[in-house]
């Protein structure tokens, strides 16, 4: 049984006439008993049905160099080995179309020593040939999950190239059709793939996107992703946000462990309430930043600016309140809430990186330098050392505090892509 | 598609609720269950909570939203309007309770946003009364609900004690009962699950406490803080029965300054004893007295006595009520007086009229001898 809790961090005091309310909500899920343990061999015991799909790019380019497909096979075998017994799974080869690697028929196999061994054997015959039409891979995954609607469905998707065998609108249509069907973590091996394409998939399907520059690193990544998937114990969790009449929810963003703007993915519940999908949960904690504009109340009035509920299925399992209290006490209304300030900075950091990389790609060196410099400054302030390290592969840092940087003349594609994909990783504020 | 107004009227709650008769899901605000046709009472939303949350859950509202007028059914249990979001005041801005010989008025005053005073009173039996006033400390978090819970709990305890005690029972009983009443009032505040953060910040919901048990010949008063009780006896000097648990009173008692100096100090009204999660000592001071004659007992919060602190000052204003006023009218008069003086605080006053019983007639029934 998983217990959810939600806590609000905010300065609820507003000065007279102020209307913008910001709050950070920390949501924590803890499972009692054995369910949700990492690498949980108790997956079946906890009663959670799981489907795990491994979709491997089998296009011709995966054979150039041969080490790519070799490592991809190995990584896929590792993922299969990491499955908890009782997980439903399939391995799919993606090219112009999707084809089954294991099981041989279009369906799912139940993980056991026997089926895992058979799968490993089938994977070793996975050969590269053909083009890349990722949309077909996604639709195949959807079909495979359709048989188990109550299961927590997750897919690892690996590609090495652009979606060259399919027009963009077809990929978009496939992504749209798969929203809510399964969650997907997307990985690009090498540097010939489009970050933008995989990011679209990951965002819509509530997963992560990352670069695996060296094929040898695939096995470790696949193992980690599979372990995390095995740890999920609650299928569909939504953040339900109610705001009063006349108020506007400006945004709802996940801000930890990664930044994901959920605003556009809201599903209306009624005139004042919307559900924001957060996918499946294991034992974990995530932070959300909510920004609501309300009608100003008189000094002394207290208003509920937002009621944030955690909804599992259609049960409310936890709640956090976002309040607004108008005061003429300047000491109260000017207090900065550390959590809100921190994540506002982290979001600005992610935007600065994205805009800087865009500017650099389009040749606007001045803008790129300004944006990436700002990013360096923000990363330093927040103590986000990982991001600083990634930035230092794209710019030469002269002064962190003032954000004075110079664009490097030569930047490895892998370094640029790593900064791009990991720009949304945040560090948690120290509470 | 139903029009937007209908949506707003029925469907603004983020909660679902179930019909208590047939169990079908219904929408809060519906008056009848669509499935079985049963009347729907005010429903609490169906929230299944797996972990004890720090929710505040005072009673469900019976009044429409003070902001937008949304019906009471659209006020959530934690007292926010589900339409406009406004937090409803814990206590009504103006309350009156009229039981004849005992009556009370509680008023928000002119300056405060909420009425954080609370009162509870009862005529337990003819000639036996209980009066309680609790003044919520406004620098604490949601003190109004705490004050009301405390006052109600104390009144219940004392009413039970009066019922259980024999006619004109010994005043010692009431001493114990007053100590118990304060303890139960304290528990009532703790049962509201005060906010942990507020507790750590030192402003967990707190209130004063003054409770009087009165019969025709005795009274007992217990108190913590600076809400007061007075005796206005006909033909007697008016008397203040309580001594404030306040900084000013302690300073004067310690001989540090005169009463006038103490009253003028900024710290004057800081109370040194109270009820609340962070209260150290909740054993009230108790005074008991025998009453000789007709008169009135007054129990009040500082929103009144701030403007007429000395007993004889207050007596003047009490007498100033129009001739023939009932106790309720006299309370209203005193509230008007305090508001007229500026109404800087919430004002609460209870009056009890005491008349000594007629002397016992020593009358023996004649005995008859059968057949003499």
Image: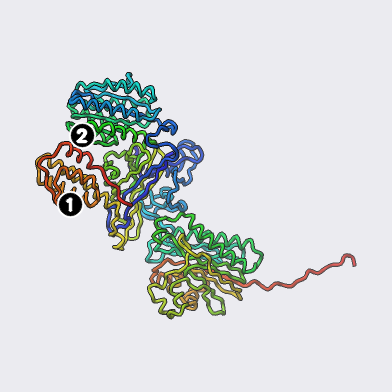
* Percent x, y of residue A19: 28, 54
**Which picture quadrant has residue A426?**
top left
Secondary structure found at label 2: loop
Write down the chain letter for disc 1. Answer: A
Write down the chain letter for disc 2. Answer: A
Left or right: residue A196 compared with residue A105: left
- Residue A203 lies, with reference to residue B293, above or below; the image says above
Q: Crowdedness of circle 2 by 10 Å Cα count: few (<14), some, many (20+)?
A: some
Secondary structure found at label 1: loop
* Percent x, y of residue A208: 27, 37
Q: How many marks?
A: 2
Q: Name the disc covering residue A400, or none.
A: 1
Name the residue beneath numbered marker 2. A213
- Residue A40 lies, with reference to residue B260, above or below; the image says above
Disc 2 and disc 1 on one polypeptide chain: yes
**Which picture quadrant has residue A98?**
top left
**Label 2, label 1: how far apart the Cα atoms are:** 27 Å
In front: A193, or B56? A193
Quarter of the image that includes the N terminus of chain A = top left
In front: B145, or A369? A369
The residue depicted at 43 percent of the width and 50 percent of the height is: B77
In front: B329, or B156? B156
- Residue A299 lies, with reference to residue B251, above or below; the image says above
């Amino acid at each position: 049984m998983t217990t959810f809790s939600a806590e609000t961090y905010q300065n609820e005091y507003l000065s007279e006439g102020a209307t913008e309310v910001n709050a950070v909500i920390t949501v924590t899920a803890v499972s009692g008993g054995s369910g949700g343990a990492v690498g949980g061999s108790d997956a079946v015991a906890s009663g959670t049905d799981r489907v795990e799909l491994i979709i491997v790019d089998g296009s011709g380019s995966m054979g150039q160099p041969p080490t790519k497909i070799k490592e991809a096979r190995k990584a896929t075998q590792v993922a299969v080995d990491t499955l908890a017994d009782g997980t439903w799974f399939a391995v799919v080869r993606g090219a112009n179309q999707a084809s089954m690697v294991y099981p041989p028929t279009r369906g799912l196999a139940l993980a056991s020593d026997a089926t895992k061994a058979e799968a490993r054997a089938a994977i070793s015959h996975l050969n590269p040939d053909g083009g890349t039409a990722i949309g077909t891979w996604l639709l195949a995954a959807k079909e495979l999950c359709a048989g188990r609607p109550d299961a927590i469905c997750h897919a690892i998707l690996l590609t090495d190239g652009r979606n060259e065998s399919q027009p963009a609108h077809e990929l978009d249509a496939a992504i749209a059709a798969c929203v809510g069907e399964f969650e997907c973590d997307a990985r690009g091996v090498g540097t010939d793939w489009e970050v933008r394409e995989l990011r679209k998939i990951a965002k819509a399907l509530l997963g992560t996107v990352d670069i695996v520059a060296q094929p040898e690193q695939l096995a470790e990544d696949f193992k980690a992703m599979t372990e995390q998937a095995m740890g999920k114990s609650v299928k569909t969790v939504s953040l339900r946000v109610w705001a009063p009449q006349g108020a506007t929810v400006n945004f709802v963003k996940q801000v930890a462990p990664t930044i994901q703007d959920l605003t556009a993915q809201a599903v209306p519940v009624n005139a004042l309430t919307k559900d924001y999908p957060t996918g499946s949960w294991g034992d974990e904690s995530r932070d959300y930043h909510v920004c609501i504009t309300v009608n100003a109340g008189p000094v002394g009035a207290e208003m509920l600016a937002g009621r944030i509920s955690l909804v599992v299925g259609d049960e409310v399992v936890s709640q956090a309140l976002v309040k607004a209290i108008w005061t003429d006490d300047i000491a109260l209304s000017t207090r900065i809430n550390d959590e809100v300030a921190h994540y506002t900075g982290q979001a600005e950091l992610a935007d600065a990186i994205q805009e800087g990389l865009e500017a650099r790609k389009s040749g606007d060196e001045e803008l790129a330098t300004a944006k990436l410099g700002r990013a360096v400054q923000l990363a330093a302030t927040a103590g986000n050392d990982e991001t600083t390290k990634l930035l230092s592969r794209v710019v030469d840092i002269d002064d962190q505090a003032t954000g004075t940087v110079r664009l490097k003349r030569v930047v490895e594609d892998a370094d640029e892509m790593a900064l791009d994909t990991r720009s949304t990783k945040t560090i948690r504020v120290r509470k | 598609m139903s029009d937007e107004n209908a949506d707003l009227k029925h469907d603004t709650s983020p909660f679902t609720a179930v019909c208590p008769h047939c169990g079908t899901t219904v929408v809060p605000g519906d008056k009848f269950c669509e499935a079985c046709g049963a009347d729907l009472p005010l429903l609490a939303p169906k929230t299944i909570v797996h972990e004890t949350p720090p929710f505040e859950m005072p009673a469900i509202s019976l009044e429409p939203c003070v902001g937008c007028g949304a019906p009471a059914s659209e006020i959530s249990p934690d007292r926010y309007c589900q339409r406009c979001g406004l937090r409803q005041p814990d206590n009504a801005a103006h309350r009156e309770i009229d039981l004849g010989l005992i009556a009370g008025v509680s008023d928000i005053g002119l300056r405060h946003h909420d009425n954080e005073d609370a009162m509870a009173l009862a005529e337990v039996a003819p000639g036996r009364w209980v009066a309680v006033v609790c003044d919520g400390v406004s620098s604490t978090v949601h003190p109004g609900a705490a004050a009301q819970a405390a006052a109600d709990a104390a009144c219940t305890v004392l009413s039970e004690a009066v019922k259980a005690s024999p006619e004109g029972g010994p005043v010692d009983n009431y001493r114990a009962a007053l100590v118990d009443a304060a303890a139960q009032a304290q528990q009532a505040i703790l049962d509201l699950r005060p906010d942990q953060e507020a507790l750590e910040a030192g402003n967990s919901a707190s209130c004063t406490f003054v409770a009087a048990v009165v019969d025709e010949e005795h009274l007992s008063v217990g108190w913590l803080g600076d809400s007061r009780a007075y005796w206005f006896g006909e033909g007697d000097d008016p008397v203040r029965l309580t001594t404030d648990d306040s900084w000013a009173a302690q300073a004067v008692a310690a001989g540090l300054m005169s009463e006038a100096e103490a009253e003028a100090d900024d710290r004057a009204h800081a109370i040194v004893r109270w009820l609340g999660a962070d209260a150290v000592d909740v054993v009230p001071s108790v005074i008991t007295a025998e009453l000789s004659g007709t008169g009135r007992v007054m129990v009040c919060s500082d929103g009144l006595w701030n403007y007429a602190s000395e007993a004889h000052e207050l007596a003047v204003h009490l007498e100033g009520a129009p001739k023939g006023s009932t106790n309720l009218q006299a309370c209203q008069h005193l509230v008007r007086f305090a508001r007229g003086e500026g109404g800087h605080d919430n004002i609460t006053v209870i009056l009890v009229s005491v008349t000594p019983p007629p002397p016992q007639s020593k009358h023996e029934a004649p005995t008859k001898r059968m057949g003499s």
